[in-house]
Amino acid sequence: MRKFILKITMIAVVSLMTPTVQAKILAIKGGTVHTLGKMGVLKSATILIENGRIKRVGQNVKIPAGAEVIDGTGKIIVPGFMHSGSQLGLSEISLTKDSNEHAAKKSPFSAAFNVKYGLKSNSAVIADNRRQGLTHAISQSSGSDGIFSGSAAVISLTEGAHMFYGRGPMVARLTKAGNRNVGWAKIRLILDQVAYYDQNRSRIMRGEGPSDFLLTTYNMDALVPVLKGKQKLVLWLNSEDDIRQAIALKKDYGLDLILSGAVEAWKVASELAQAKIPVIIDPQSNLPVSFGQVGATLRNGALLAAAGVEFAIAPGGMALNHNAFMVNQVAGIAVAHGLDWSQALAAITLTPARIFGIEADFGSIEKGKIANIVLWDGDPLEVTSNPVYVIVRGVNYPLVSRRTLLRDRYIGLNKRPYAFH
């Protein structure tokens, strides 16, 4: 009997976490829509979604007969949020090795490491972040035994095989070299060697070239697209001096470069704007935890915006995975310290999509784009507000996760049994 009850309970849990079947057409009627596109902010608008994409947006849109209708009256409707440097889909419990797929340490891989092979389509972390307004992300490695950490992935916070959207940027961490002088020398030498390897591949494979490359051939192969500007490079660093070195690196090698961390970016904001190098920042970083972060300030975002630097907002630490949804909270922190509200919203929606070259599908509520849309009961950058509907790739997902199921089960222990009998 106990086994039968347990089986029925598990079936119920699975059914609760399964998204509603996608209707032929889904309509969102009413509400204030922040499109982040040319149409700006629309009041009492209607959004039509078909086959996972936005079909129409406007104030005089007719809803077809038979469409599933969501009443957005009184709600604030925005594009789904994006985390620009997460570990989503790669980690379940940080202290267990078998549930973590984000590191290439103690392996032969550095640049050749690719996180897409380790993505967990049944990750319990995905549903909990999705129900709080996060709909897509860059999922990346935490590091390797070298400067280059491998290729990240663009993911959707969906269920099953549709999680993987496409290849993300190559990721590198200057701190993995220890001494900064060694780090910059290694990066430049590796790029020079990759260029030589690409031009003399046949000779080298026949054993006719030099044998003292810093990387193996398969790791150099992975860096060829970066050197040719066909794959973006995210470089993690913080100090003003290292940012200037990064600006010179882009100029010398023609890299499609993005800086992440960039705690002291505000100090060289004009140079970054002139070099057209976007940055990814965490507005919470305001402590001088190292000599490379002495200039940390809560006003980093506001100062970068004033200088015309393109930037995205992405929190670190616990918010890399289980709490990745906190992108809107840290965006709110930036607003509290001088950043314009609309710029903060863009920094977790449209701007990161532009930075990573996926703006054709993500970042705004416009015709033809993937329907990643969230309806909020208040200001989405305010911690007291909550999503009331979350739509990812056109699917209206229930706001249910393992966390909510456990909450509901044990919230009233005096009213029902502690466990099944």
Image: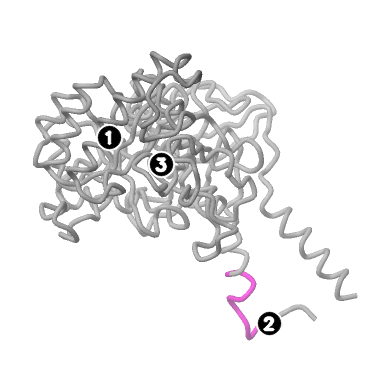
Q: Is residue 344 above or below residue 178?
A: above
Q: Is residue 88 magenta?
A: no
The residue drawn where x is 58% and y is 70% is: 407
Q: Amino acid at mark 2?
A: Tyr
Q: Secondary structure at mark 1?
A: helix
Q: Nearer the viewer, residue 273 or 307?
A: 273
Q: Position of residue 344 (x, y in %)?
A: 27, 41
Badge 3: how crowded within 10 Å, few (<14), some, or many (20+)? Answer: many
Q: Nearer the viewer, residue 92 or 148?
A: 148
Q: Which residue is mark 3?
A: 149
| Label 2 vs 3, first from the N-terminus | 3
The span picked out in magenta is 407-418
Q: Nearer the viewer, residue 154 or 224?
A: 224
The residue drawn where x is 47% and y is 36% is: 30
Numbered mark located on residue 187 in the image = 1
* Helix, strand or loop: magenta stretch: loop
Q: Position of residue 22 (x, y in %)?
A: 67, 35
The residue drawn where x is 66% and y is 45% is: 19
Determine the image quadrant of residue 158: top right
The residue drawn where x is 24% and y is 55% is: 284
Q: Secondary structure at mark 2?
A: loop
CA distance separating discs 2 and 3: 46 Å
Q: Which residue is mark 2?
A: 418
